[in-house]
Amino acid sequence: MPREKSVKIFSIIGIVILILGIVLVALPVALPTMAGGGGEGRLEAKVYSIDSFMTAVYKVYGNPSLGYWVAKTVIKNSGTGPLYDVKITYKIEGLTDWSEPKEYKLIPPGGAIVDLYYPILLQPPNLQTATPGKLYVKIEYKTKSDGEPVTETKTKPINILGSRDFIFSGLPPEENTGSFQDLVSNYQLLAAWVTPKDPVVERYAAMANKLTGAGAGAALNDREALAFLEAVWIFSVYNGITYQTESDAFWSGKDSQWIKYPRDVIRDRSGTCIDTSILLAAVAMSQNLKAYIVLMPGHAIPIIVLPSGQLLPIESTTLGDKVSFQQAVETGFRVVQEAFQGPHVILDVVEAQTSGIVPPELPEVPPNVLEQWGYAMPGIGGGAGEGQVPGGGQEGGAAPQPQPQPQPQPQPQPQPPQPQPPQPQPQPQPQPPANMKKIVNPYGDLPWSISVPVDWEAEELAYENGYEVDVYSPDDTVLIAIIWSQSLTGNNIRSGMESVFNEYFNGYQVTTDNPNGALGNIPAEVVIYKLGTGDMAVARYTNVQGYGLAVIYIISQVAVSQDTIVAMDQIVQTFQIGG
């Protein structure tokens, strides 16, 4: 049994941990035999759903590991007996068929489950404008083990957005503080608009690359990469791509905004700062160059990573001004340096796409679509440029020579400080205080680690179907519990933990529930609890590598403060899977 504690909250932690084991292990087995007393379950269901479904990211919604659920069903059993054989299915009118049922064999009296819906679409949507839709949730259950099934259906309105509609903020009003980070909380989803594998983008890159006089190989060294990027700039200017000013409401985060795919910018020969940033990122990535997009209030700018790691910001809005590539880079350095002095987020496009935020399927186009749209090489004619092209040549004259003795080199001299943290992150993860020690999984199954102060003590607990490590502060006012199991989901662990809060902490109130949060280097649902005892708990629930996982810290009432919460969040964010 865990050690006894002097502070009240931890005098019952031993019971809490024991009860958690009972809730997650013993109750599902014992309750069916205990239910013969005649009590019946009573189902209370509440459905939460997103207001708008962004069809551009339908692949993201269908990937549970990313955590972008479309609907969440919370079922509580307020009866005197269990609920049996609970099945939940979902359907979005016009987009999906009924989902495979999620089954919960038993929900004990006072128990609850949380079910999340990640829809699989019948076919890629290609809506051009928003369309009203309906979400259906069907719940089937029994109030007695030998009773007849009862079915309830709930309906929620959902706005099905067009294939280019983007909503910057996914936070409900009560969670949105108005900060820039909250206004663009969906920024990672912009990676779905970056389409390096689109044949239109690949053809665009190939035509531009001809200006270098070399074949493919932009990712081989800086010299070739710079030559390629300058050629893309020259090709874009010559063919008349310009900056299109966005409306004042564009950055408000309140409504959906139209964002173009790179092929749209190429076709229309215009785009906003985000549109043109996405275009340059996609073209660079088509040649295996890494790209970031920096968002700041009212603006966006791409940063291309050269093979050496050197960062190259390019002010894409100067395309319409027909400035040289050198000038676009110099302006880019100034803009990025200013951005890093204020609120901003950094989208690592490659990392986001690797995690699963990938582009949708786009309609096929003819192989010669660029020629059909009037694109031509400088010196051949047919372009939309006006007279001068970069390098001093006249339209219709010899092609400019950005050959790999790039003149001038697009690193300003002297080179400005690097405009990025060592590993650009949207919000650089806080680091715990000094004098830390690393704790790793003592059971060797799920490879996790966490860094805690050296004077904190840890205890290990093993159950039949899971494991737990508890870490205590020296003054016994803070506990971190790490719980994982192959036979339980994150939702199962949440249900058990909330039953514990009801039984031993005089109930609880959920003050924040963020499904798109993080636990170190993995996505997780972050739930903040105000406990009936006056204590506070912050839990992160997730599923990873076939395990249900929860990392929960509880702060005693006597220690609850903003400083303690910040310190605990810093510690928890050192949690890592795989090292």
Image (cartoon, helix red, strand yellow):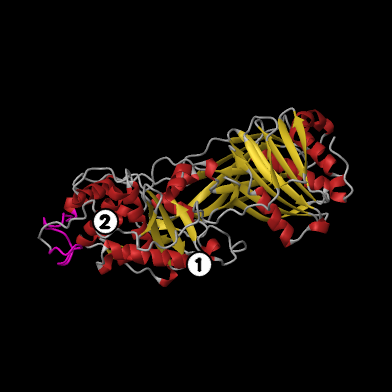
Query: Mark on residue 361?
Result: none
Magenta-highlighted residues: 373-394
Badge 1 amino acid = Gln
Q: Which mark is residue 230?
A: 2
Q: Nearer the viewer, residue 382 or 491?
A: 382
Q: Nearer the viewer, residue 162 or 21?
A: 21
Please report the residue visible at 37 percent of the width from the left and 51 percent of the height from the top. Answer: 194
- The kind of secondary structure element at disc 1 is loop
Give the crowd class for mark 1: few <14, some 14-19, many >=20 residues within 10 Å: few
Label whose residue precedes the other's in the sequence (2 or 1) = 2
- Residue 83 placement (x, y as % from top left): 72, 37
Q: Give the alpha-carbon distance from disc 2 to disc 1, as whole Å.
A: 28 Å
Identify the residue position indicated by label 1 in the image. Answer: 341
Q: Nearer the viewer, residue 146 or 219?
A: 219
Q: Any magenta on residue 382?
A: yes
Relative to 472, say whether 547 is above or below. above
Q: Amino acid at mark 2?
A: Glu
Residue 190: x and y, percent?
A: 43, 54
